């Protein structure tokens, strides 16, 4: 065989063998945090990728806003379910985190994150017992209550454990899902709580989920002001009766620069990643696109079949994103479809920037919470290089979601 050809074949074989060894060893290398030479190309797909530069820019924007406007940040972790991210937020001055579930509260607190606020009422013996145990271990933990009977149960459970629980009263802010009616009813609940010796009343919460995605900044402002007015009125009633309100909490990524003057702390969460839903709500500047934060999170997928013109099959099906997306990073011309649990479809105008077998495509999630929920880790990318992996809290290992 001619020597040039032999050399070429040998080189190719060695390169292929190296690539195979690299991907076979990826789990091994993740364990050792050995990221040398690893790029998107080497990752198993579908997988979740954070663009670290955009992510850090988002964190900086929110943190600078909070510092300059004098509002605290207790950002919501249900979007990311990651201790690595929570710790980064804390390092940038957050006073704690907000969580939706008991398991998230335990994960964060047990990992050393202080100032965890559970924003969903922990009703029922199992949840109450777990949260009282957490309060006993972590005196900085806080939880919401929106019902007098819940306050009584919590007080009894805390008394039985010889501990005190920090309580925030959840006030209805336009959503029917949770929160006591503002005004007289809410005030009566506050008074009840202040009379219970195992509860420590800290303040009020009003989360307006309806305002967060209202299109157009002025309309969003009007909606948010309307929704949190009852909480502010209740806070005044407390103040006039000499009941101190340490905390007025609420807000979201969509209202972070609206609620700031009214709340003492913000619960925004999505700003760090953004999703296709948030991108369309419009900026304060009047821009139709919400440009305050950038989309830093994608689902990396591989083209696994190319049989038809202008159509590619990917490995990202229903199981890769609990809510379907329609947006491919860098390819606004491509439509996204699903073909089954493990198959996705991309369609574009044949002959224009055709995908090839084995190519990668990155999808922007439509809804963050239900997408991050599917994966067990984020791969962290700087440019094309993978520089780290952060675990996402999964169902396995947690007592419950
Ligand atoms: C109670 C509560 N607070 C805060 C947030 C965070 O809002 P966003 O992710 O829109 O910033 C959510 C999100 O759904 C929430 O349910």
Image (cartoon, grey):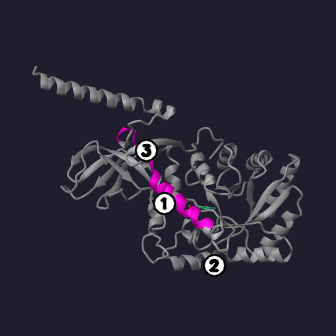
Upstream in the sequence, badge 3 or badge 1? 3
Q: CA distance from mark 3 to mark 1?
A: 17 Å
Q: Secondary structure at mark 2?
A: helix
Q: Is residue 53 magenta?
A: yes
Q: Are the residues tagged 2 and 1 within 8 Å (C-beta)?
A: no
- The residue depicted at 41 percent of the width and 35 percent of the height is 36
Please state the extent of the stretch shown in magenta in the rendering: 41-67
Q: Is residue 173 above or below residue 149?
A: below
The residue where tag 3 is placed is 47
Number of marks in picture:
3
The x, y position of residue 139, in whole percent, is: 79, 50
Q: Which corner quadrant holds the N terminus? A: top left
Q: Is residue 256 left or right of residue 352?
A: right
The x, y position of residue 84, in whole percent, is: 58, 46
The residue where tag 2 is placed is 226
Q: Secondary structure at mark 1?
A: loop
Can you tell which mark lies on residue 274? Answer: 1
**For residue 351, what is the image quadrant?**
bottom left
The x, y position of residue 145, in whole percent, is: 75, 61
- The residue depicted at 33 percent of the width and 57 percent of the height is 330
Q: CA distance from mark 2 to mark 3?
A: 40 Å
């Amino acid at each position: 065989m001619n020597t040039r050809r032999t050399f070429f074949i040998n080189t190719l074989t060695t390169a292929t063998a190296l690539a195979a060894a690299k991907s076979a060893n990826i789990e091994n290398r993740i364990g050792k945090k050995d990221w040398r030479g690893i790029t998107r190309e080497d990752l198993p797909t579908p997988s979740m990728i954070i663009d670290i530069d955009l992510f850090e820019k988002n964190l900086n924007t929110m943190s600078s806003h909070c510092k300059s406007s004098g509002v605290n940040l207790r950002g919501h972790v249900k979007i990311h379910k990651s201790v690595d991210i929570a710790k980064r937020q804390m390092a940038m001055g957050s006073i704690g985190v907000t969580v939706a579930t008991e398991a998230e509260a335990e994960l964060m607190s047990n990992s050393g994150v202080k100032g965890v606020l559970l924003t969903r009422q922990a009703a029922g013996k199992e949840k109450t017992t777990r949260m009282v145990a957490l309060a006993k271990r972590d005196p900085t933990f806080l939880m919401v209550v929106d019902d007098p009977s819940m306050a009584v149960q919590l007080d009894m459970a805390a008394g039985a454990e010889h501990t005190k629980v920090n309580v925030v009263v959840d006030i209805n802010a336009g959503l029917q899902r949770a929160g006591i009616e503002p005004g007289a009813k809410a005030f009566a609940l506050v008074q009840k709580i202040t009379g219970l010796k195992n509860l420590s009343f800290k303040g009020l919460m009003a989360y307006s989920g309806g305002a967060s995605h209202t299109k157009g900044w002025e309309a969003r402002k009007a909606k948010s002001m309307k929704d949190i007015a009852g909480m502010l009125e209740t806070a005044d009633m407390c103040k006039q009766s000499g009941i101190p309100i340490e905390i007025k909490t609420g807000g979201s990524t969509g209202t972070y620069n609206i609620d700031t003057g009214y709340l003492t702390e913000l619960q925004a969460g999505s700003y760090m990643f953004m999703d296709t839903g948030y991108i369309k709500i419009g900026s304060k500047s009047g821009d139709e696109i919400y440009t305050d934060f950038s989309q830093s999170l994608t689902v990396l997928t591989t083209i696994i079949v190319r049989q038809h013109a202008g159509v590619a099959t990917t490995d990202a099906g229903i199981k890769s994103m609990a809510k379907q997306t329609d947006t491919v990073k860098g390819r606004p011309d491509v439509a996204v479809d699903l073909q089954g649990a493990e198959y996705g479809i991309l369609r574009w105008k044949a002959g224009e920037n055709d995908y090839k077998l084995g190519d990668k495509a990155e999808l922007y999630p439509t809804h963050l919470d239900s997408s991050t929920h599917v994966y067990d880790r984020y791969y962290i990318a700087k440019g094309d290089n993978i520089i780290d992996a952060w675990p996402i809290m999964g169902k396995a290992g947690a007592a419950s979601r």
